[in-house]
Amino acid sequence: MTKLIQPLIRVEYIIAALTALTITLSLFYIDEGKYDFDGIFKPDNLFFLLVYLSAFVGYQLGIHNLLQFIVRNKSQKIISAILAAVSLPLAIVIFLWLVKTV
């Protein structure tokens, strides 16, 4: 790969994007008890799908960058795995709290 493209394609970006897409599509599927994907291609639904997707990706990458800043030794992978396991339920709880207060 060229040096220009190589920094853009990283494993943590791919994992964060796939996880965020899975969470976002799951939330879209169960939205308001409809349990279907009818209307997913409407412009307003696509807009909010992208908003939620970017929020979840940003949250995961922010946690990852914070960990890299705090811990810079070999135990970083262990701490990253633990924090990733904690951050997903925490992100869902924060999301549900935000939706409830709106």
Image (cartoon, helix red, strand yellow):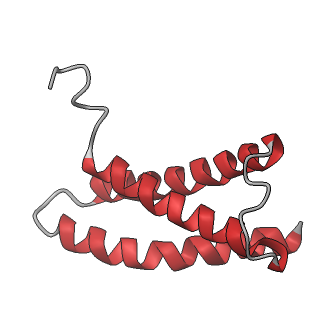
**Residue 35, relative to residue 1: is it above or below?**
below
Which residue is drawn at the image coordinates 38% and 71% (left, top)? 84
Which residue is drawn at the image coordinates 61% and 62% (left, top)? 24
Q: How many marks?
A: 0
Query: Residue 42 in the image: x percent, y percent?
Result: 80, 45
User: Left of 97 or right of it: where is 14?
Assistant: left
Query: Residue 67 in the image: x percent, y percent?
Result: 33, 59
Near-viewer residue (50 or 67): 50
Query: Residue 87 in the image: x percent, y percent?
Result: 47, 72
Quarter containing the C terminus: bottom right
Near-viewer residue (70 or 33): 33
User: Left of 20 or right of it: where is 25?
Assistant: right
Q: Quadrant of residue 77?
A: bottom left
User: Left of 55 or right of it: where is 83?
Assistant: left
Which residue is drawn at the image coordinates 28% and 73% (left, top)? 81
User: Left of 27 or right of it: where is 78?
Assistant: left
Query: Residue 65 in the image: x percent, y percent?
Result: 36, 51
Quarter containing the N terminus: top left
Near-viewer residue (79 or 46): 46
Q: Quadrant of residue 74?
A: bottom left
Q: Residue furthest left?
A: 74
**Residue 99, relative to residue 68: is it above or below?**
below
Which residue is drawn at the image coordinates 52% and 50% (left, top)? 58
